[in-house]
Image: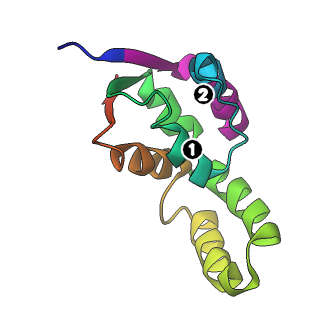
Amino acid sequence: MSLSVLTIDGRNVHDFESFIQEFNRVYSHFGVLWNGNLDAFNDYLVWPDQRYALVWKDSDLLRARLGHGEMVKWLEERVQHCHPSNVPHMRERLEAAKLRRGQTMFEKLVEIVEGKGDYVQLRLE
């Protein structure tokens, strides 16, 4: 049985915002409009309600463009809007990202997709 294939084109991604746009382009026929919330990203990955392959073309570009700098931007925004009890942890992650330590945004997104292995087969090309 062959899997349906959805393709994220790394050439269309320059930062996290453009990754959101590319994701929305690819998933638009499912009626999905993602705003960048990573919990929602996790949920939208199972939206097709069938097993499928998610191909990230030019994943080397994605890896380079969704690095620590994009994680810093995302964490700076999260620190402002997260529950007060999460602020110390988020600030710790933010400081690590500023020092180019910890997960990059690319690594976080891959981790989320790979966590959906029952639904999604990630292919980095």
Separation of disc 1 and disc 2 at Cα?
A: 9 Å
Q: How many numbered marks does the figure carry? A: 2
Residue at 69% x, 86% y is 85
Q: Where is residue 115 in the image (x, y as percent from the top left)?
A: 35, 50
Side of 121 relative to 60 (left or right): left
Q: Which amino acid does label 1 sit on?
A: Phe
Residue in front for this viewpoint, 111 or 98: 111
Q: Is residue 50 above or below residue 99?
A: above
Precedes in sequence: disc 1 or disc 2: 2
Q: Is residue 25 above or below residue 78?
A: above
Q: In this view, does 81 lie above or below 69?
A: below
Residue at 44% x, 21% y is 58
User: Farthest front residue?
Assistant: 49
Residue in front for this viewpoint, 59 or 120: 120
The reply to whether discs 1 and 2 touch (Cβ–Cβ < 8 Å) is yes
User: Farthest right residue?
Assistant: 80
* Mark linked to residue 63: none
Which residue carries the number 1 mark? 41
Find the magenta span and give its range.
5-22
Q: Position of residue 121 (x, y in %)?
A: 30, 32
Q: In this view, does 104 lie above or below 4?
A: below
Which residue carries the number 2 mark? 23
Q: What residue type is labelled 2?
A: Phe
